[in-house]
Image (spheres, grey):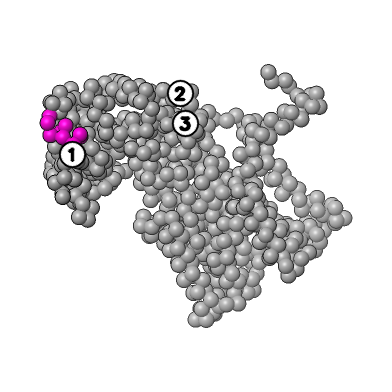
Amino acid sequence: MDDTILLETQSLRKEFGALIAVDNVSIRVRANSLHSIIGPNGAGKTTFFNLLSGNIEPTSGRVIFKGRDITHLPVHRTIHLGIGRSFQITNIFPNLTVFENIRLACQAMGHDNFRFWQDASRFKKYIARTTEVIELVGLTSRAMTLARALPHGDQRKLELGMILAPDPELLLLDEPTAGMASEQVPELMALIQRIRLAGNKTVMLVEHNMNVVMNVSDAITVMHQGQVLAEGAPAEIAANKEVQTAYLGGLYRTVISNQ
Amino acid sequence: MQNVTEQPSAKAMPLLKRAKDNFGSLVTLIVLAALPFVVALYDGQSLSSLLANEAGSSKFVQGFVIEILILGIFALSYDLIFGITGMLSFGHAMFFAVGAYLTGIMIKSFGWSLWATLGLVLAAGVLQALLFGIVLPRVKGITFALVTLGMASVFYIVIQAREFGEYTGADVGLQGVIAPDFLNPSTQRLRFYFIVVALTVLIYLLYKRFVTSPTGRVCVAIRENEGRARMLGYNTFYFKLAALTLSSITAALAGALHTLHQPIVTPNVAAMSFTVSALLMILIGGVGTLNGALVGAAVLRLLQFGLSKYFSESASFISGAIYVAIVLFVPYGIVGTWRLKRFERQKGWENLLKLMGVGKRKE
């Protein structure tokens, strides 16, 4: 881990009508760190991720990645800069094989997309990369299975593979463990750690479950009602009174104060 | 959408395996090549009389198969945008009609040569795709269907307008388009037949290659999950436009063949019902299977012909009932269901061989 800032947001704000989903969020993510964003339901974590990846445009504020302003770049451009993004809900091509899912992700990085007169299997570099990625996420034995036939845990791994295929510098993982059986969670987290350390990648993780991120994170940002509530190392966050309230009594307190 | 499209394999296939995988297509091709001669033989027509294109069953069958193949090419082009790329268009008849009308008008009213006309038809194909492409990034799904329907309806009204009647024949349609001598559907039908067969094979092969090419694989990905395809870094607009362009050119070419084959072009080829018949053909054959489009065209045309011959007035009622039955009981279409049942078929075949005592025992 070093002190270079890979990603920075400056007063990022997103309004949906009267609702302010993300309110003046400024964070700095250091290169090669694992930075977690946690917060209760509706804190704006996913919206924040959507702003970073270019799925939606912010109302105001800036997103800077490697010193470049990417605020208004659409999603199919940010991925070419090295930002990979996963979703809370599994987002794959259900009727294609595991191999084809990953192969499509590999092909997207090259410049052969419009060679309609050649068979896709002739492009050996994508095939080779696909095999590599499938092995990395441990799905080699399921390569020819249709993606929809995979168990949920394997689908999450497949999705991770699709993000890893272009070898991005920054991984935005939106609740990668969502819907997983609790005994599978450590396995996936270990996989994420292994990939991060092996490839010198920066990972940003949105999590719901505090316990999952406490052990693995280098830094944690806590969001609450669109704003940054606290930021710091895991130990600081765990000790933070406000965070405890937000998690345990936040909703309750809001209800009371509204009356 | 069902998964009935082939996946490219990691290894290149050896020639023999490729022939085995395309057994059905090869057999169909051989049957098509032999058909005029077999029918002539059956009819007692001599070879010289057949080659001179004299009237007889063979000539009738040739004409009938030409119609099927033209419909098949049209259905194939619809399968590319609907079955492969997942775009529902209700304006597909326009693609065909533009080709048909342009060919007729240029040859008849302007005296253009066939080659110049075909060049213009191809250019018009590209233009139409670009026209549909204008709305492509803005609307999706059913909205795209309605916008395309709107565009095609405008075209349908324009070709029936009395103001252009001098060229289009207004609501009667184009009449008396004289095809060039070497392609005359009446005096050179056998040649025309083989040209259409060859064109169908070429277009089919091109489409098959397109679907397994990097571009086509992305089109399939767009059908499966467009948002995800964009997330992978594909600007999906260009891929949809590519599919649309190829489809539009093909449909326009089918339209041109239609005009060359039949001297009368009615405005019906631009009507919504013609788009629906393309949809029907690929539903019968199997959405997204490509060869299903050709099978569907054959089934549709044969049904139309057979039913109107034996049931005259109630034909459309019966054909409607048959279509409903097909969609209900063969939901993946003929080819689609055939492919889905591959394993059951293999099992059954092995059991049959075992019963006859010749099967290899697989323990």
Q: Secondary structure at mark 1?
A: helix
Disc ID at residue A140:
2
Camera-side residue: B50 or B151?
Answer: B151
In this picture, is A216 found above or below B311? above
Q: Residues within 10 Å of mark 1 (few under 14, many from 20)?
A: some
- Which tag, 2 or 3, sits closer to the chain's start? 2
Q: Quadrant of residue B351?
A: top right
Q: Which is in the foreground here, disc 1 or disc 3?
A: 1
Q: Residue furthest right?
A: B44
In this picture, is B6 found above or below B93? above
Q: From mark 2 to mark 3, how far is it between C-alphas? A: 13 Å
Q: Which residue is mark 3?
A: A150
Label 3 resides on the chain identified as A
Q: Position of residue A178 (x, y in %)?
A: 34, 33
Specify the principal SS of the magenta part.
helix
Provide the residue span drawn in magenta.
A240-249
Q: Which is in the foreground here, disc 1 or disc 2?
A: 1
Q: Secondary structure at mark 2?
A: helix
- Please name the amino acid that badge 2 sits on: Thr
Label 1 resides on the chain identified as A
Asked whether residue B317 appears in the rendered view, the answer is yes
Q: From mark 1 to mark 3, how far is it between C-alphas? A: 38 Å
Asked whether residue A123 appears in the rendered view, the answer is no
Q: Which residue is mark 1?
A: A250
Camera-side residue: B268 or A173?
Answer: A173
- Please name the amino acid that badge 1 sits on: Gly
